[in-house]
């Protein structure tokens, strides 16, 4: 009410220009919310980078939180089960064939029955797990914050193979790229600026190459596939389209502080510390640019019904028109949003940095 009234006053005042958006569009309604984590004494800004996953068949939503608990809720908001893990959950879980896979900062990868919350197996990676697990070819693939890609048997939790690059000296950007899979090849990004293509069954390298320009932070923390191409973002200032078969660069553009990217409706949407940019897949041409405030996002953008949902940390979750990049709504949720939104069948779930899970009915 105050913002709307101020917008009217500014619009009416001669010589003043209003930069406030118009009346908010009804993009969603809050179906329910659950406070999952209480702020501890001394907390001035909390962070929940994990985010939820939702099962399309049952509607169950599963989310891990910074206090080390994995929670499952039914579509009506009632609790299905919860599990205490070893360390915080810093990345979203994955759900595949009735099993939840989730990794912790304590290095434990869990396989949990979706329906009951019963633990099927635990695998101790002995390194902090930093990505959403990827399930493919009977394997669970997850990358650690020490630049090790692990492949674990999805049925038993037995180690199958790993691929490691020596973590470079000095500081790196916290986080890692989710593993992406195309056919019989897995692709991983590393903090030394390299991307690797690996045999899915064995982990044998098909190709490895440095894609990041020289700079202070050369981390490759986001990969995506689309239109027969592999796309990578390097924090030192580049976005690339790569031939997944050969590793050859098809195009490259300079984009400082590129952190997360996603393939959305035939375009590559990249989030940096200052802007959101949509690029054409064929040549990397800018389609639109939108300014953001907040800092480096922890999660990539996702499609949410007719809109594009982009977490921007303290700047909240932005809802954008995917054809123009225009921000049409901002959802905060308490201390901003770093985790990605999970959407299925008109319902979106998002975890605020204050530790509250929101169920949004998308419109």
Image (spheres, rainbow, N blue to C red):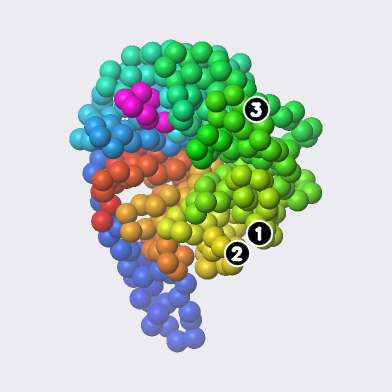
Say which label, 1 or 3, has the lower sequence index: 3
Callout 2–callout 1 Cβ contact below 8 Å: yes
Q: Quadrant of the C terminus?
A: bottom left
Q: Is residue 96 magenta?
A: yes
Give the labeled residue for mark 1. 251
In the image, the segment drawn in magenta is 94-100
Q: Is residue 15 visible?
A: yes
- Which residue shows up at 42% across the image and 58% down it? 265
- Which residue shows up at 71% across the image and 47% down it? 211
Q: Give the SS element for disc 1.
A: strand
Location of residue 58 in the rendering, given as x and y in whole percent from the top left corner: 24, 32
Q: Give the SS element for disc 2.
A: loop
Q: Is residue 121 above or below residue 272?
A: above
Mark 1, residues whose alpha carbon is within 10 Å: few (<14), some, or many (≥20)?
A: some
- Which residue shows up at 28% across the image and 31% down it? 60
Magenta region's main secondary structure? strand
Q: Give the SS element for disc 3.
A: loop
Give the labeled residue for mark 2. 283
Mark 3, residues whose alpha carbon is within 10 Å: few (<14), some, or many (≥20)?
A: some
Location of residue 303 in the rendering, given as x and y in whole percent from the top left corner: 39, 52
- Which residue shows up at 44% across the image and 43% down it? 340
Question: Marks 2 and 3, how far apart in space?
Answer: 31 Å
- In the image, taking residue 178 as reference, residue 22 lies left or right, namely left
Say which label, 2 or 3, has the lower sequence index: 3
Location of residue 267 in the rendering, given as x and y in whole percent from the top left corner: 49, 59
Mark 2, residues whose alpha carbon is within 10 Å: few (<14), some, or many (≥20)?
A: few
Question: Marks 2 and 1, how far apart in space?
Answer: 6 Å
| Residue 129 occupies quadrant | top right
- In the image, taking residue 72 as reference, residue 156 lies left or right, namely right
- Label ID, residue 204: 3
Question: Marks 1 and 3, how far apart in space?
Answer: 26 Å
């Amino acid at each position: 009410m105050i913002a709307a009234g101020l917008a009217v006053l500014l619009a009416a005042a001669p010589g003043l220009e209003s930069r406030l958006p118009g009346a908010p569009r009804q993009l969603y309604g809050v179906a329910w919310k659950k406070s999952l984590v209480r702020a501890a004494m001394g907390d001035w800004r909390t962070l929940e980078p994990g985010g939820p996953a939702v099962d399309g068949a049952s509607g169950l939503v599963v989310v891990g939180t910074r206090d080390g608990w994995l929670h499952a809720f039914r579509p009506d908001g009632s609790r299905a089960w919860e599990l205490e893990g070893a360390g915080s959950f810093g990345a979203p879980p994955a759900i595949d064939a009735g099993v939840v896979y989730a990794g912790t900062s304590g290095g434990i990868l869990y396989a949990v029955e979706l329906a009951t919350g019963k633990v099927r197996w635990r695998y101790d990676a002995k390194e902090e797990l930093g990505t959403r697990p990827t399930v493919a070819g009977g394997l669970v693939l997850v990358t650690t914050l020490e630049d090790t890609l692990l492949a674990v048997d999805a049925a038993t939790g037995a180690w199958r193979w790993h691929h490691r690059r020596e973590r470079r000296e000095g500081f790196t950007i916290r986080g890692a790229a989710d593993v992406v899979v195309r056919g019989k090849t897995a692709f991983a990004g590393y903090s030394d600026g390299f991307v690797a293509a690996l045999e899915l069954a064995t982990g044998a390298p098909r190709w490895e190459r440095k894609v990041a320009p020289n700079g202070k932070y050369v981390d490759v923390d986001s990969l995506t596939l689309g239109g027969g191409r592999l796309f990578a973002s390097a924090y030192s200032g580049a976005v690339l389209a790569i031939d997944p078969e050969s590793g050859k660069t098809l195009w490259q553009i300079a984009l400082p502080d590129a952190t997360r990217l996603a393939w959305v409706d035939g375009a590559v949407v990249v989030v940096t510390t200052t802007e959101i940019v949509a690029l054409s897949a064929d040549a990397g041409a800018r389609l639109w640019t939108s300014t953001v405030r907040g800092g480096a996002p922890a999660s990539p953008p996702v499609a949410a019904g007719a809109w594009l949902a982009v977490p921007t940390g303290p700047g909240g979750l932005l809802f954008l028109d995917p054809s123009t990049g225009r921000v049409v709504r901002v959802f905060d949720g308490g201390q901003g949003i770093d985790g990605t939104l999970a959407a299925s069948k008109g319902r979106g779930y998002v975890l605020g940095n204050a530790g509250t899970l929101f169920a949004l009915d998308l419109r």
